[in-house]
Image (spheres, rainbow, N blue to C red):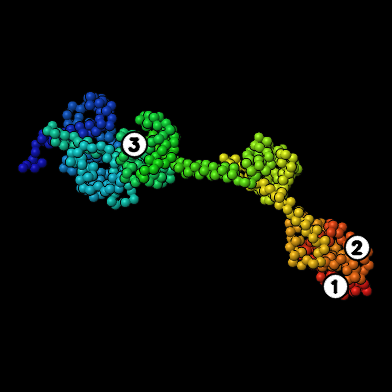
Amino acid sequence: MAGFAERPLSWIQSAHANASGRLSNALLDLVHSSHPAITSSTRSSPLPQLRPAMNDPVLQRQTDRQQLQQIIRGLSDGVILVEPDQRIVWANDAALKMHGVEAIEGLGATVSEYRDRYELRYRNHHRLSEGSYPIDRVVAGEAFSDVVVEVVPVADADARWVHRVRSLVLTDADGAPDCLVLILADATDWASAEQRFEKTFNANPSPAVICRLGDLRYIKVNQGFLEMTGHERDRVIGRSVYELDVLEGAQNRELAIQRLGEGATIPQMEAELSLPDGGSKLVIVAGQPIEVGEEACMLFTFMDLEPRRKAEIALRQSEERFAKAFKLTPVPTLVCSADRLAILETNEAFFAATGYGAEDVIGKTLAGSGLFERTADALQVGNVLTKQAALQNLEFRIARKDGGALDCLVSAESVSIQGADCYLLVLMDISDRKRNELELVSAIETVMQDASWFSQTLIEKLANVRRNGQSTPSAELGELTARERDVLGLICEGLADKEIAARLELAPNTVRNHVAALYSKLGVHSRSEAIVWARERGFFGSAGGSPARAKKRSRS
């Protein structure tokens, strides 16, 4: 076969013209696919200022090729031309920049060298093998579009780009591949934004799913949704909104479905989600149209209302139990507001004890209802509640509707009823107990007119009984004179006035004067009361009544 140098000049010019023509046509088709307006003018009338000088067809083709290369070199999309024999013959500046090189030699001379220099992965981090690279696929004559790959130089693993790749295969008259073109779009920023969105979506604790509007199938689900519903990820991804209906039981389901079909915002509404275990969950659902990977989608977000519903049920049940206990308790009880102390509710025991019906006191304040025998007592209760929000066993006189009165121990606690701050007042009727105590004290005083035969232990117990029913006198043991203490001590031993006079070697009238002064100072009216007063303070007087002490005082 003759060498290239042996070929006639006309053959060389013809071959060069054919190659230049194929490249020019390839570039024209490429530009036409991206910018039809540019190529239509170029095909119909190549640049007018150059046209008159271009009589030679070969020169004309070379000039067209240069012009098209200049146009393509300025495009933001990258362009790589590959021969069917897998040689990489040309690339524009955008394609070189997307690979981090400055000259076409940096890409490699062939497809095999390109694979050695660059590692490609899909967005799911799956590495592409030989034959799967876009450059391999275009060499095989495959036409494809929108293939997104991550490109990492083998020599620099820290550098990476994301390319969106499509192919252009030009064939000759026989239909065989003649010129192969890779068109690259830099999707690095888009992929970074997608990655940030993906991380935010997955990390968001609010339950969410994303469905593709094109086929209404779920393409993303976050951990919050899986935890809220108990679904598994594989049981959500790929299912349609008809199979996993997030709008089930929605308040305005028809509107939601209409907005979903229109790709419009779905307002917040309550819905009942079916759970995989057969139960359901009350939620608030809303939909917002978004784009994911340049596909129209709907982002569904949820708020779990189940804890609120359970809390409402528990609160309702608690209030029902409180209402039943309030009505059935045998102790007179009433509820009043915390701000005005206005009576809001009373129970049956209150009516039975006081004779006041609900119509008599509901809406009135404690002070204005006449419930307390003294208005000052009602005001005192209000002051204590204002300071302490509670009171315990304070004794007051409660007026009955028929004009009588009750001795009651009043206790109160703050409560919240249907969100309102209130006080629960309990009136413990101690009228019978006080009456019995008074009768018992009267009987004790009668018996103790002559207490000489009572044992010390019995007198102390009687003193304790009396102490529970009376307030403490104002005088104290330390306020008594030495002589008054001696007289009180001998009274506690059960001695009469004559016996005391003999013991202390005093005149009977003098003893009587001491006893009268002692009664006045102690606030008592009988010997038994004086004995009880002394026992309440632990005074027994045995030392005070000794004859030796009396004789010592008389000598002094």
Disc 2 vs disc 3: which is toward the camera? 2
Q: Three-letter amino acid code at disc 1?
A: Ser
Residue at horizontal 33 percent and vertical 42 percent from the top: 236
Closer to us: mark 1 or mark 3? Answer: 1
Distance of label 2 from label 3 (alpha carbons): 106 Å
Residue 241's tag is: 3
Q: Nearer the N terminus, badge 2 or badge 1?
A: 2
Determine the secondary structure under disc 1.
Answer: loop
Instruction: Give coordinates of residue 169: x percent, y percent.
Output: 20, 36
Q: Are marks 2 and 3 in contact (CB under 8 Å)?
A: no
In contact (CB < 8 Å): disc 2 and disc 1: no
Q: Earlier in the sequence, mark 1 or mark 3?
A: 3
* Badge count: 3
Q: In the picture, which quadrant includes the N terminus?
A: top left
- Specify whether residue 208 is in view: no
Q: Which residue is mark 1?
A: 546
Q: Nearer the viewer, residue 151 or 326?
A: 326
* Spatial CA span between label 2 and label 1: 19 Å
Q: Name the residue rendered at 62%, 41% in the picture.
A: 347
Could you tell which of marks 2 and 3 lies nearer the N-terminus? 3
Residue at disc 3, secondary structure: loop
Name the residue type under label 2.
Arg
Residue 76: image quadrant is top left
Q: Within the image, what quadrant is residue 355 found in?
A: top right
Q: Residues within 10 Å of mark 1 (few under 14, many from 20)?
A: some
| Residue ID for mark 2 | 512
* Residue 12 image position (x, y, % from top left): 12, 36
- Tag 3: residue type? Val
- Disc number placed over residue 533 in the picture, else none: none
x and y percent of residue 408 in the render?
Answer: 70, 48
Position of 254 with respect to 75 (left or right) is: right
**Cα–Cα gap, marks 1 and 3:** 105 Å
